[in-house]
Each structure stands twice: as structure tokens, then as C-alpha cells.
Amino acid sequence: QMQVAESGGGLVQAGGSLRLSCAASGSVVPITLMEWHRQAPGRQRELVASMSGGGMTSYMDSVKGRFTISRNNRKDTVYLQMNTLNPDDTAVYYCHVRGDYDTYFLDYWGQGTQVTVAS
């Protein structure tokens, strides 16, 4: 059973930076997709950034040029470098990991980490 845990959230002033980390442990299958989602109060969860097993990345429009998703060499940890943060980035950030079990996929989610950007 895979476990997913986020870290790195906190309180930052507008214009500042944070780096989120997401570690996937207990995996015995390839990880085909790692993503960051976020959910602000009263809003639906939205996809912020994703990285495929092959390293392809994509971002939601509002974070392009400010956020960068990356993985470590072992490919079991994904990061989200967030620069030039603004109050609209305030949300709980969740890590999503997809495991490839050959004939099917399973999705795993972390508990989330709070990011608060003060104006």
C-alpha cells in the first residue's frame, strides 16, 4: 500500500516563495503520474501541475511561469517550487500519485498541506 505525504506549506508574504515536497513510500509498482492539486475555501479542487512518468509537465494557466514541478532521481518524490506567490494561491495543496499495476491504475492522495499567502 502506497503512502503519500506532503510537506513544506506555511505562511508567506505576497511575492515570496515556498517549496512543497511530496514523498511516495511503500510503492512496489512504477509511478506513472504525480500531480499537485489545490483547494481554496469554498472552491472546487483544481489541478495545479502534473508530471508524467516520462517527465512531461503541464500547469494551470494562472501559475505558469511562477510554479515549477520536478521529481528526484529516484522518482519517488515530487516537488512544487512556487515563486511570486499572491493571495489567490492560498489553499490546501494536495499531492496525487498514480501507481501502475499493469492492468489497472490506483490513485493515492496525501492529507494536504496549507499554503497561506498574506497580502
Image (cartoon, rainbow, N blue to C red):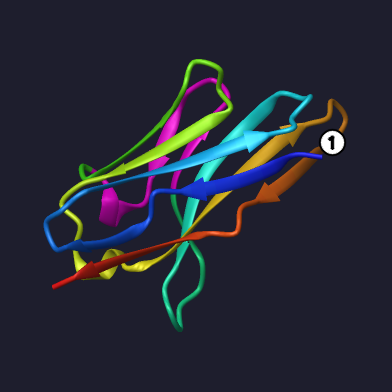
Q: Which quadrant of the figure has residue 58? A: top left
Pick the quarter of the image with the N terminus.
top right
Picture layout, residue 1 above or below residue 48: above
Judge by depth and name the residue closer to the eye, 60 or 70. Answer: 70
Could you tell whether 51 is left or right of 116 in the image? Answer: right
Name which residue lies at 70% across and 48% down.
108
**Tag count in the figure?**
1
Residue at left offset 42%, top offset 73% = 40
Image quarter of the C terminus: bottom left
The image position of residue 106, as x and y in percent, is: 78, 43
- At numbered mark 1, what does the secondary structure look like: helix, strand or loop? loop
- The residue wearing badge 1 is 104
Rendering coords of residue 87 (x, y %)? 22, 70
Residues packed near mark 1 inside 10 Å, few (<14), some (14 to 19) or many (20 plus): few
Image coordinates of residue 109 in percent, x first then y, are 65, 52
Question: Three-letter amino acid code at disc 1?
Answer: Tyr
Q: Farthest residue in the right direction? A: 103
For residue 17, above or below residue 119: above
Residue 92 x %, y %: 45, 65
Identify the residue at horizontal 28%, vertical 51% (top origin): 63
Q: Is residue 7 left or right of residue 86?
A: right
Q: In which quarter of the image is residue 42?
A: bottom left
Q: Residue at x 36, y 51 (%)?
A: 60
Q: Give the range drawn in magenta.
A: 49-64
- In the image, 111 versus 50, the foreground residue is 111
Horizontal side of 19 relative to 31 (left or right) equals left
Is 53 covered by the magenta stretch? yes
